[in-house]
Every structure is written in C-alpha cells, then in structure tokens.
Image: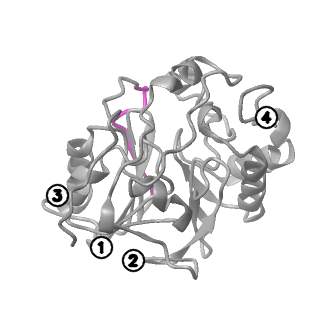
C-alpha cells in the first residue's frame, strides 16, 4: 500500500454527540451486522464463519478503537476487512478511516465523484445551520468539513456497478446528499445499505437523534445540497422495494414498515423531507 502521509482536515475533532443506541450491535441478517457509533451506523458485511468481510463506512472521529473492537468481537482477534466501502465522505462516515487504514492496511473504495473530498482536493459545501429543522441542524456549523486526504489508499468503485469483495451486491449512485453518494443493494434478498440517501431517524432533531425514534425520513437536511437529486435517489431506492435496509442513522428496518415508509417518502418527498427554507433549498 502507498506510504504517503494521510491526514484529516484542520477542523477534525471529537464531536460529543450520542444517542440511546450508541454501542448497540444488531445482527440484521446472518451476514449483515450493524453497529451504532454515537449517532451513526457502520456495517460489517460477511459471514463470521468464513472470516471474509467488508466494512461499510468508518464512523465518528476518534472512534477507531471502538470499531476495531466491534470487528474483532464479530470476526475474531486480529481480523481485518478485505476493504472499506464508503457511502460518502462526510465526517461522521469517515471519522476513523485513517486510523483503520493504518491498522489494517486495506484499500478504501468510494464513488468517483467523492474522490476530491477524500484526497484533499476539495471541501464539501458548508453545512447549513439556517435550514428548517431542530438543534442538530443549528449545531452543524461546528461539524468538521475540511477534506481528508487518503492519497492512493482510496480508489473509485468499479464503473460496472460491482462492489469489491461483495460479489452479490451492486452499488447504486444516489446523489443529492453528496455528489458521489452511493447505496449498496443485493438483489437476491433485496437487502439495502442506504447510507444517508434516506435515514430512519429525523437527523436534524436533537431529541429524536438521542431517542432514536423510528421515522423513515429524507437525508440529513443540514448537509444535503441538491434536493432534486436527493428526491430522485429516494425514488430510485423505493422502486427496488427493499426487504431489509440499514441506513446511516437510525435503526435497521424491514418488511412492510420499510416498503410502505419508503414508498410514502418517495411519493411525498417534498412534504416530508425537503425543508421549507435553507440556503440549498431552491
């Protein structure tokens, strides 16, 4: 693997946010494991019996030790993933990525359009604390937003939609929340790893983030910059009629609750998800 220096942005810092689900692990399927790091989910995809697995997303800043501990609890001491797949590059999904890459020496994959934000070349648009929403939205001005630089450790996902080391999954471009946001889908059992294309908790509300009240919602408002693309991404995922979904925030959901909730979100996106005001609302 490349030896160049990896670095976070100058604004990288621990964020003292938590929820009642922090530290909770759920075996959603025999080969799909969801763990909540403070307020965000990571996924371990792979059967523990085979010891071959992939990590999807990399949690909050300064949580690498927690992620390594969860991984070793699931797959055994000194286990390591074959790769890390990023749904996107926001701070709460890449918070421990550098420490994990150094510890495991594994490749990282993301959509081509996310590469500038993961190689130090560009920063995301500023989060919008003025957007309609609750206290988390107001706090978003303090979230890390400088680009990280993974250098040659990160590479684009294959252009044919395949996911490295996850032969049953395909990646789906679901932009809106970020330009290169992706979701992962397995057709044979309609399993969806949605990232932040939609979530199952109102992520702008501090109370709902803390209590993790289940509610199929649009992407986090304070960080979503293209609402037209976000709407189309939700409709694309709803058309798949997923049976099981893990989202970036909130509890896993399945069955009718998922299908009906996602169908309603797709149908009434402007009323449910889109804020009435904010600097990225057209």
- Residue named by callout 2: 165
Residue 175 showing in the rendered view: yes
Q: Are marks 2 and 1 in contact (CB under 8 Å)?
A: yes
Which quadrant holds residue 239? bottom right
Give the structural element (helix, strand or loop) at label 1.
loop
- Residue named by callout 3: 103
Q: Is residue 227 left or right of residue 204?
A: right
Write the residue at 50% across / 57% down.
87
- Neighbours of disc 1 within 10 Å: few (<14), some (14-19), many (20+): some
- Residue 19 forms part of the magenta stretch: yes
- Residue named by callout 4: 272
Q: Which residues are magenta?
A: 18-28
Front position in the image: 230 or 82: 230
Front position in the image: 105 or 12: 12
Give the structural element (helix, strand or loop) at label 2.
loop
- Quick one: quadrant of the C terminus? top right
Instruction: Measuring from the top left, give residue 266's x and y in whole percent.
Output: 80, 49
């Amino acid at each position: 693997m490349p030896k160049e220096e990896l670095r976070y942005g100058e604004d990288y810092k621990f964020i003292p946010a938590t929820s009642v689900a922090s530290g909770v692990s759920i075996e959603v399927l025999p080969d799909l494991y969801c763990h909540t790091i403070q307020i965000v989910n990571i996924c371990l995809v792979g059967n523990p019996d085979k010891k071959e697995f992939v990590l999807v997303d990399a949690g909050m800043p300064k949580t690498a030790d927690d992620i390594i501990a969860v991984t070793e609890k699931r797959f055994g001491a000194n286990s390591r993933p074959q790769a890390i797949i990023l749904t996107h590059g926001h701070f709460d999904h890449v918070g421990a990525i550098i420490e994990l890459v150094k510890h495991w020496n594994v490749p990282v994959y993301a959509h081509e359009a996310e590469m500038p934000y993961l190689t130090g070349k560009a920063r995301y648009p500023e989060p919008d604390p003025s957007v309609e929403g609750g206290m988390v939205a107001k706090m978003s001005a303090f979230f890390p937003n400088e680009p990280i630089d993974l250098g040659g450790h990160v590479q684009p996902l294959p252009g044919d939609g395949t996911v490295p080391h996850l032969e049953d999954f395909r990646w789906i471009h679901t932009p809106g929340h970020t330009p290169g946001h992706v979701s992962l889908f397995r057709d044979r059992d309609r399993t969806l790893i949605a990232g932040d294309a939609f979530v199952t908790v109102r992520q702008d509300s501090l109370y709902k983030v803390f209590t993790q009240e289940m509610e199929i919602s649009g992407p986090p408002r304070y960080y979503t910059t293209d609402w037209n693309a976000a709407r189309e991404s939700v409709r694309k995922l709803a058309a798949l009629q997923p049976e099981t979904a893990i989202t970036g925030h909130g509890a896993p959901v399945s069955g009718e609750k998922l299908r009906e909730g996602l169908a309603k979100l797709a149908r009434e996106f402007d009323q449910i998800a889109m804020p009435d005001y904010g600097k990225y609302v057209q």
